[in-house]
């Protein structure tokens, strides 16, 4: 572990500086002193300080060479000469050619899906390609199907954004007016039926919007996916590819997946194998869980721009709370004509109880339960902090109480014997 406060790096063309910030409450400031550099496709402004906090894993890449300064304590920091950036740039150039052709022929631009196992840099490649597209004056649509991370909204959702400017170095893509659908779990495997339903719906809505926005339509779509690629995970990817009618699938660092997709996808879908960057950092399940918590916190409290969420009381009578998915019954108990899988997308009313405390609920645009809740996008999220009566209920939960023979608190409780326990 290095403990250096100020470090200066001279980067040659086509090399990158990688660093990680690990220590708690640590802040590292990055500044480009001379030359040109970019961070996951966003150009860095010379002499402007950029702050990175605990958990940041960063690569500053330069096409032309530059000098970079780091202030603060980094867990690791090194310069790497071997990067797959030239390959990624070639992918961008190929997509750009398709956009030009789409513009000339008034057709749809390339729909690209990035797939691969966990921790291979799918989200990073998506960000780089979107940034390069928008720097060329395009307006691509960013779709995030990775429910485990929640790059567009909170984890447990899928969503889409129209990208109009490069991602901010510290805050990522602007979150204005995203289209978000509720899933409620951190892996598609928890409810495949629901996941495929909302993916299908998101694809439909994007196709509709593209019809009315020519610029977005010719710029195309870039889809980030989950790292679950085997068994049902593969079926989920194939379903997404079908739903979005993808033209290009970029497979990161997995030959088996590449060959399976090449075998199963229709001929017009270009399946391309890409190497992963040596800089991508593997994350443990604890780190992933922490990243999810941080993302939810960020939703309510903001990242750099602080938000001040306030609580207000709402009567449970004024609310209608539902969850998606009823317990599934064996096929023999199902009413005629219904499949057991139908239960997984059933909307079930939830009665208010202490179990709701600290839960994050999605606020749907659906007018009522009979409206199409699954197909409606979200207005936002609320966190339940339960009022005092229910709070007492929670404290007493699972406690054993002694029932005294004492007539009341003023009677001699300590000297009275017990009737029993509850
Ligand atoms: P997941 O399986 O969670 O979807 P992923 O395949 O999308 O992961 P990323 O999230 O893109 O992987 O990358 C994992 C981590 O590695 C991120 O924190 C990212 O900032 C970091 N990272 C990516 N590329 C580099 C690089 N070239 N140098 C240093 N760190 C990098």
Image: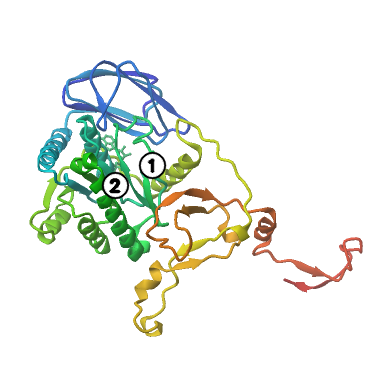
Per the image, label 1 sits on a secondary structure element best described as: loop
- From the viewer's perspective, tell me whether residue 90 is left or right of residue 213: left
In the picture, the quarter occupied by the N terminus is top left
Can residue 121 be seen in the rendering of this structure?
A: no
Which residue is drawn at the image coordinates 50% and 41% (left, top)? 300
Q: Among all residues in the image, which is located at the extreme right?
A: 411
Mark drawn on residue 92: none
Q: Position of residue 144 (x, y in %)?
A: 31, 48
The local crowd at label 2, few if under 14, some if 14 to 19, many if 20 or more residues have their Cα within 10 Å, is many
Task: Find the residue positioned furthest to the front.
Answer: 212
Where in the figure is residue 20, as x and y percent of width and height? 34, 32
**Marked residue nearer the N-terminal end (1 or 2):** 2
Q: Residues within 10 Å of mark 1 (few under 14, many from 20)?
A: few
Q: Position of residue 35 (x, y in %)?
A: 22, 16
- Secondary structure under the numbered disc 2 in the rendered image: strand
Identify the residue under disc 1: 177
Inspect this view and state whether residue 41 appears: yes
Q: Quadrant of the C terminus?
A: bottom right
Q: Is residue 4 left or right of residue 60?
A: right
Quadrant housing residue 167: top left
Question: What residue sits right under mark 2 in the picture?
Answer: 143
Residue 270 locus on image (x, y percent): 11, 50
Of residues 326 and 164, the one nearer the viewer is 164
- Drawn side of residue 399 relative to residue 319, left or right: right
Query: Which residue does the image show at 12% across and 42% down from the upper left?
Result: 102
- The way the protein has been coloured in the rendering is rainbow
Camera-near label (1 vs 2) is 1
C-alpha separation, residue under disc 1 versus residue under disc 2: 13 Å
Quadrant location, ligand no. 1:
top left
């Amino acid at each position: 572990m290095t403990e250096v406060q100020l470090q200066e790096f001279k980067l040659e063309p086509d090399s990158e500086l990688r660093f990680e910030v690990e220590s708690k409450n640590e802040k590292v400031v990055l500044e480009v002193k001379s030359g040109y550099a970019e961070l996951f496709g966003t150009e860095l402004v010379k002499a402007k300080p950029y702050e990175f906090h605990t958990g940041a894993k960063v690569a500053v890449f330069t096409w032309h060479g530059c000098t970079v300064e780091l202030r603060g304590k980094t867990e690791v920091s090194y310069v790497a000469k071997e990067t797959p950036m030239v390959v990624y740039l070639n992918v961008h150039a190929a997509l750009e050619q398709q956009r030009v052709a789409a513009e000339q022929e008034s057709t749809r631009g390339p729909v690209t899906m990035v797939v691969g196992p966990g921790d291979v840099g799918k989200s990073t490649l998506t960000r780089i390609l979107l940034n390069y597209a928008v720097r060329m004056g395009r307006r691509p649509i960013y779709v995030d199907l990775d429910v485990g991370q929640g790059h567009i909204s909170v984890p447990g959702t899928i969503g889409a954004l129209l990208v109009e400017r490069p991602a901010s170095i510290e805050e990522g893509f602007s979150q204005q007016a995203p289209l978000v659908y509720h899933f409620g779990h951190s892996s598609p495997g928890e409810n495949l039926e629901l996941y495929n339903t909302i993916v299908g719906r998101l694809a439909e809505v994007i196709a509709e919007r593209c019809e009315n926005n020519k610029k977005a339509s010719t710029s195309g779509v870039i889809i980030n996916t989950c790292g679950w690629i085997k068994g049902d995970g593969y079926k989920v990817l194939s379903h997404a590819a079908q739903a979005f009618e993808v033209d290009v699938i970029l497979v990161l660092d997995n030959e088996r997946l590449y060959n399976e997709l090449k075998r199963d996808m229709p001929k017009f879908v270009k399946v391309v194998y890409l190497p992963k960057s040596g800089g991508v950092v593997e994350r443990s399940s604890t780190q992933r869980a922490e990243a999810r918590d941080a993302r939810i916190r960020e939703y309510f409290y903001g990242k750099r721009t602080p938000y001040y969420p306030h609580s207000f009381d709402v009567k449970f009578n004024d609310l209608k709370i539902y969850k998606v998915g009823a317990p599934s019954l064996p096929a023999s108990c199902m009413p005629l004509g219904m499949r057991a899988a139908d239960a997984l997308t059933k909307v079930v009313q939830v009665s208010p109880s202490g179990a709701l405390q600290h839960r994050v609920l999605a606020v749907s645009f659906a007018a009522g339960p009979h409206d199409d809740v699954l197909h409606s996008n979200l207005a936002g999220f609320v966190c339940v902090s339960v009022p005092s009566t229910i709070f007492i209920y929670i404290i007493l939960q699972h406690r054993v109480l002694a029932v005294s023979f004492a007539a009341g608190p003023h009677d001699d409780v300590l000297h009275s014997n017990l009737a029993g326990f509850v």
